[in-house]
Image (cartoon, helix red, strand yellow):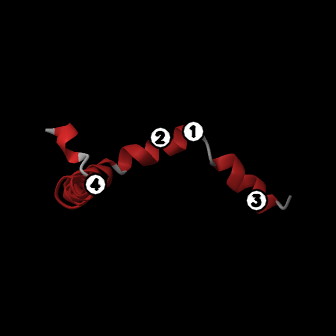
Amino acid sequence: MPDDEQTAAARWTVRSELHAVGRDKPLLAVLAAILCLYCAFIAGPIVYAVLAINGIADFFK
């Protein structure tokens, strides 16, 4: 292995990844909010419509 690959591998640790997640909390919160809105307003009604067409949607009432 070349020296630059070894130093890059040595720099990667679980601790450094956790620090990166800590720095990215606002981004992760925004992505989670977008996912929730997508599921609530786009994917949910589509899935419900497909189930209603198949007659299975009565189970969820």
Relative image position of residue 43 (x, y in whole percent) = 26, 58
Relative image position of residue 36 (x, y in whole percent) = 23, 51
Asked whether the beta carbons under mark 2 and mark 4 sit within 8 Å of each other, the answer is no
Asked whether the beta carbons under mark 3 and mark 2 sit within 8 Å of each other, the answer is no
| Distance CA(mark 1)–CA(mark 2) | 6 Å
Helix, strand or loop at label 2? It is helix
Where 31 sits versus 17, above or below?
Answer: below
Seen at 28% across and 54% down, the residue is 54
Helix, strand or loop at label 4? It is helix
Seen at 70% across and 47% down, the residue is 10
- Which callout, 4 or 3, points to the residue nearer the camera? 4
Q: Is residue 41 left or right of residue 20?
A: left
Amino acid type, mark 1: Val
- Residue 54 - label: 4
| Distance CA(mark 3)–CA(mark 1) | 18 Å
| Distance CA(mark 1)–CA(mark 4) | 47 Å
For disc 2, the marked residue is 18
| Camera-side residue of 33 and 52 | 52
Of the two numbered discs 3 and 2 on the same chain, state the one appearing first in sequence.
3
Which image quarter holds the C terminus?
Answer: top left
Of the two numbered discs 4 and 3 on the same chain, state the one appearing first in sequence.
3
For disc 1, the marked residue is 14
- Residue 5 - label: 3
Q: Residues within 10 Å of mark 4 (few under 14, many from 20)?
A: few
| Distance CA(mark 3)–CA(mark 2) | 21 Å
Q: Is residue 10 left or right of residue 26?
A: right
Identify the image quadrant of residue 52. bottom left
Relative image position of residue 49 (x, y in whole percent) = 21, 58
